[in-house]
Image (cartoon, grey):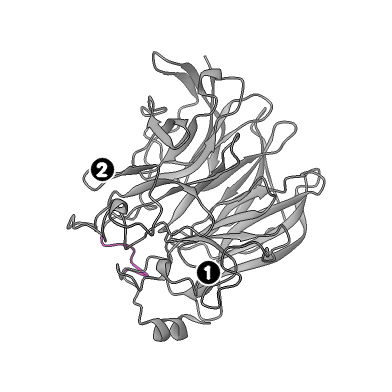
């Protein structure tokens, strides 16, 4: 279904499709900070050294350490994938990646390794791509990564989150594998502004504003929640999301955790439940850009939606949260089980203590650097924390004990 047919059928409108939101978007802005090569940072809790692994990357979007050795796979939103040797900073372009629609918030986005990597050596990429009419959609594909030759072999498209629309915003898009080895993928609401019950994120006949659940080969699992519902897309696992750009798996429970951008404030941390409606935009804790008017009602006022485990309410100033991971390394044992979340406009790395569904923010990290932090990962061999900085000329930073 193309955008015109979809809009005609649903009566929807797109605001700011080309110019962005009525106020600066949750995913826009220029980082003028100058990367620092190294230095001491931390608090009374933890002393650490911050180092530059590599510099000069163009809008890095995801950082994915390989399970053995010092190589890290990095996507750059402009359309590149590179291998970075975290030991010496060597950058090697990876050939064979798909071409992308690098405009607005779109481009080369997330990466995830097959649970058995390197056997099989599948790497999964999410990216935006346009059709012949110039409308775009979030795509999922995979290729076998030949590390020695730095190339993807046999790259194939697996899924397209439909419909294609005339917007450069809110593509999502994170991808992880759950403990069941199903693939989970976030899709943004593409910046539709009709904040009511007919919003695309509340309409299960499309894949916008959702978490999708697929097999490793891109098929629909029979156990998906809506496969028996003729009025819902079979790929949907959860819906009612605005633009989730962080997703990770709890190391003990196996639950899927997400971070999601709000409109003005209203940013969220969610635990994703099978078939859950997360409320956007009929239930939300945020408000509209500029006016401060509430969007929908509070999650607490509806019993048919899933409330966030942590949120930044209207008037709080927001965060907004991007890439996320649970800390499971040995370098910072006092952080084990904590949730690390990259902040964009807030320009720091947040650390949250987690006890079941109780989430509390601890001392901020990197708040003195002025960095928009797009993604965060833990190096499996050292337990050091790697952070991708969102800027046109950006570093990958490493946090290690002082």
In screen coordinates, is 1 left or right of 221? left
Q: Quadrant of residue 52?
A: top right
Q: Secondary structure at mark 2?
A: loop
Residue drawn at x 33%, y 70% is 197
Q: Disc 2 designates what residue? A: 317
Q: What x and y, as percent, mark residue 213?
A: 61, 59
Q: Is residue 222 above or below residue 391?
A: below
Q: What x and y, as percent, mark residue 114?
A: 72, 48
Q: Is residue 12 above or below residue 246?
A: below
The CA distance from mark 2 to mark 1 is 30 Å
Magenta stretch holds residue 17? yes
In this view, the residue in front, 70 or 111, is 111
Q: Quadrant of residue 101?
A: bottom right
Name the residue at the front extreme: 303
Q: Quadrant of residue 66?
A: top right
Magenta stretch holds residue 91? no
Which of the labelled discs sits on residue 137, or is there none?
1
From this viewpoint, is residue 221 visible?
A: yes
Q: Is residue 170 above or below residue 53?
A: below
Residue range highlighted in magenta: 16-22
Label 1 crowd (10 A; few <14 / some 14-19 / many >=20)? many
Label 2 crowd (10 A; few <14 / some 14-19 / many >=20)? some
Residue drawn at x 72%, y 57% is 216
Q: What x and y, as percent, mark residue 176?
A: 61, 49
Q: What x and y, as percent, mark residue 38?
A: 50, 22
Q: Is residue 286 above or below residue 128?
A: above
Which of the two labelled residues, at mark 2 and mark 1, occupies the earlier sequence position?
1
Assess whether mark 1 and mark 2 are in contact (beta carbons under 8 angstroms). Answer: no
From this viewpoint, is residue 96 visible?
A: no
Residue drawn at x 67%, y 27% is 87
Which of the labelled discs sits on residue 153, or is there none?
none
Residue drawn at x 36%, y 45% is 320
């Amino acid at each position: 279904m193309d955008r015109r047919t979809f809009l005609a059928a649903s009566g929807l409108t797109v605001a700011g499709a080309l110019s962005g939101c009525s106020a600066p978007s949750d995913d826009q802005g220029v980082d003028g900070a100058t990367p620092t090569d190294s230095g001491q940072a931390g608090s009374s809790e933890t002393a650490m050294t911050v180092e530059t692994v590599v510099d000069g990357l163009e809008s890095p979007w995801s950082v994915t350490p390989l399970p053995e050795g010092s190589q890290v796979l990095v996507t750059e939103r402009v359309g590149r994938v590179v291998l970075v040797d975290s030991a010496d900073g060597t950058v090697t372009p990876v050939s064979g990646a798909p071409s992308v629609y690098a405009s607005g918030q779109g481009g080369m986005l997330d990466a995830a390794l097959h649970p058995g990597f390197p056997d099989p050596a599948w790497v999964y990429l999410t990216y935006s791509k346009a059709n012949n009419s110039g409308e775009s959609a979030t795509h999922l594909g995979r290729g076998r990564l030949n590390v020695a030759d730095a190339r993807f072999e046999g790259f194939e498209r697996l899924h397209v989150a439909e419909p294609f629309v005339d917007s450069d915003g809110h593509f999502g898009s994170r991808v992880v594998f759950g403990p069941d080895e199903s693939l989970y993928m976030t899709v943004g609401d593409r910046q539709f502004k009709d904040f009511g019950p007919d919003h695309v994120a509340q309409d299960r006949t499309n894949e916008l504003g959702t978490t999708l659940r697929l097999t490793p080969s891109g098929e629909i699992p029979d156990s998906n929640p809506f496969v028996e519902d003729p009025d819902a897309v079979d790929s949907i696992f959860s819906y009612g999301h605005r633009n989730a750009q962080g997703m990770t798996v709890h190391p003990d429970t196996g639950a899927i955790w997400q971070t999601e951008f709000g409109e003005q404030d209203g940013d969220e941390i969610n635990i994703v439940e099978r078939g859950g409606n997360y409320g956007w935009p009929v239930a939300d804790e945020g408000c509209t850009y500029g006016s401060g008017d509430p969007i929908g009602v509070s999650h607490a006022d509806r019993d048919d939606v899933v409330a966030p485990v942590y949120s930044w309410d209207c008037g709080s100033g927001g965060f907004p949260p991007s890439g996320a991971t649970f800390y499971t390394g040995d370098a910072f044992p006092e952080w084990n089980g904590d949730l690390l979340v990259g902040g964009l406009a807030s320009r720091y790395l947040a650390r949250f203590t987690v006890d079941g569904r109780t989430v509390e923010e601890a001392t901020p990290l990197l708040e003195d650097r002025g960095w928009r932090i797009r993604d965060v990962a833990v190096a499996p061999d050292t337990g050091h924390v790697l952070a991708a900085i969102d800027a046109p000329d950006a570093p990958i930073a490493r946090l290690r004990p002082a």
